Amino acid sequence: MLILVQVLILLHVGLWVLLGGETITPIEPSEGMEFVKNGVINAGTIFFALALISTWIFGRWFCGWGCHIVFLQDWCYALLRKFGIRPKPFRVRLLAWVPLALGLYMFVWPLFYRIALAPWLQPNLRWPTITTDLTTSNFWESFVTPLMAIPFLFICGFATVYVLGAKGFCTYGCPYGGFFAPLDRVSPMRVQVNDNCAQCGKCTAACTSNVRVHEEVHLHKMVVDSGCMKTMDCIDACPNQALSVGFTGIATGKKIARKTQKYDVSIAGEFGIAAVFLIGFFSFRGLYASIPMLMAVGMSLVSTWIIWKGVQLFKEQNVSVHRHQLKFHGKLKPLGKLALLFSFLTLFFVMQSGAVQLLGFAGDSAAKNGDVQRALSYYKLSGPMIDGGIGFSSNPNVDLAMSKIHEARGDLQEGERLLRRLNNFVGEDQRATMLLGQNLQLHRDPQFVQEFYLETLKVNTHWTLIWEDYIAWLRREGRRDDAIDASFTANSTNPNAPRLQIQWELLHQ
Ligand code: SF4
Ligand code: SF4
């Protein structure tokens, strides 16, 4: 089923790429945020609503039967086992609240803000009208770039499975799981046991969701752990046909067997781990305007685990990772030294990322208060090392803010340099190109500006904003005939662009 889901996703993307034009909006739960924020009902909203309702009836089935990230995690888990690595679950308490907190932030906070806070903070904020948006021509708009998708798959696949266990991302990072888990507790459908159970534990061994199946069925006659994704692996693994799935009763008030197990850190350690996770999350989220929320969660979870291992290497006599001994009787092994170095580097990376973000915020704040010199200093420091900053990359938002300040001060060359860097960063982007063109109009000779527009429009004939700017510039240059010719070409190639039509009419007045 999970392979089929992958095939359907590829088919959806493939048809959109090959055929172009309109397609169904992404069938992805995060798209539901558009509804709580802007009242837009898209395919993702409908899909997430159906997933929630069906979870209430059938339990947490979606994760095991329909989630592409679970497929990725299962595949990574199987691959790691092929190489003799048996990922163990990382057992902590506070991080288990991350999925619910994220889910509430994504889907409940926007509504809470509108209902409870906006009347005080933004009295003019209106409720959006409910609209539908079931098709799109820009399918990839809300997704990360393919370049960012590769580290995303690595972090949320191999890395989280290796350090947090088979369903590590589901347990500590998935915001949808934050809703599915409590709904599963009040769902009547669950794995149940008959009298054939011999307590052999094979069901528990087969479960990649870390459910203590044999203990739970012994205690409650059914599985009550909301980590159960109804994959039925335990049912297959049972040699006595003792397990089945059916409507058997809700799990409210029944203790999860996993909770009786030993945790990997002390209570004090839990708070330390939660603090490192939060610092990591806020340091990574939106870093270089590139890291989306879920990837920041994955990166922070993995970084937190690595830093925790480093702390263990300092404090404890014996430390191991899976089958590898890093420290034995107080003596660091060569692998332990490497792990310690890696842990230091990870800590440094988190702190450096946090500093980059803080400098960016400090720049925004100074710019808001009119202290542009200070803003420029902060922005520059948050930039890439090759440009005098402390970061690994530029940030297009920061480059835009800096270019505006330089342009306002008359330093148009520096503004151009930053806008060119912004353009290189974002790739083919109409708005970024428009800003660069507007800068060039202010200080480059007409020949240069003309070539810039002609080259851009030769490749991107559908960029109506660029056509508008180009035609308006020709008009301002006193080249009315050239403007009319350009407007004719623009309207011929973009017959449904009303602003270009208005421009055409105005040129003939
Ligand atoms: S193996 Fe059993 S307990 Fe584990 S997730 Fe699948 S159905 Fe649930
Ligand atoms: S595998 Fe079957 S018999 Fe063994 S503990 Fe699980 S339910 Fe009982």
Image (spheres, helix red, strand yellow):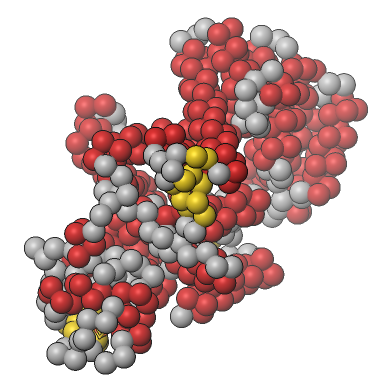
Position of residue 266 relative to residue 17, above or below, is above
Q: Residue at x 31, y 91 (%)?
A: 239
Quadrant assignment for ligand 2: bottom left
- Which residue ends up furthest to the left in the rendered image? 253
Looking at the image, residue 139 lies above or below residue 244: above
Q: Position of residue 360 (x, y in %)?
A: 53, 23
Closer to the camera in the image, 160 or 257: 257
Up/down of 67 relative to 318, above or below:
below
Q: Is residue 373 above or below residue 378?
A: above
Q: Position of residue 305 (x, y in %)?
A: 44, 45
* Residue at x 46%, y 80% (from the top left corner): 1
Residue 467 appears in the figure: yes
The residue at 20%/86% (across/down) is 197
Q: Is residue 309 left or right of residue 356?
A: left
Looking at the image, which is closer to me, 24 or 417? 417
**How many numbered marks appear?**
0
Left or right of 121? Residue 321 is right
Looking at the image, residue 381 sits to the left or right of residue 210; the answer is: right
Q: Is residue 141 visible?
A: no
- Where residue 182 appears, as percent x and y from the top left, is 21, 60
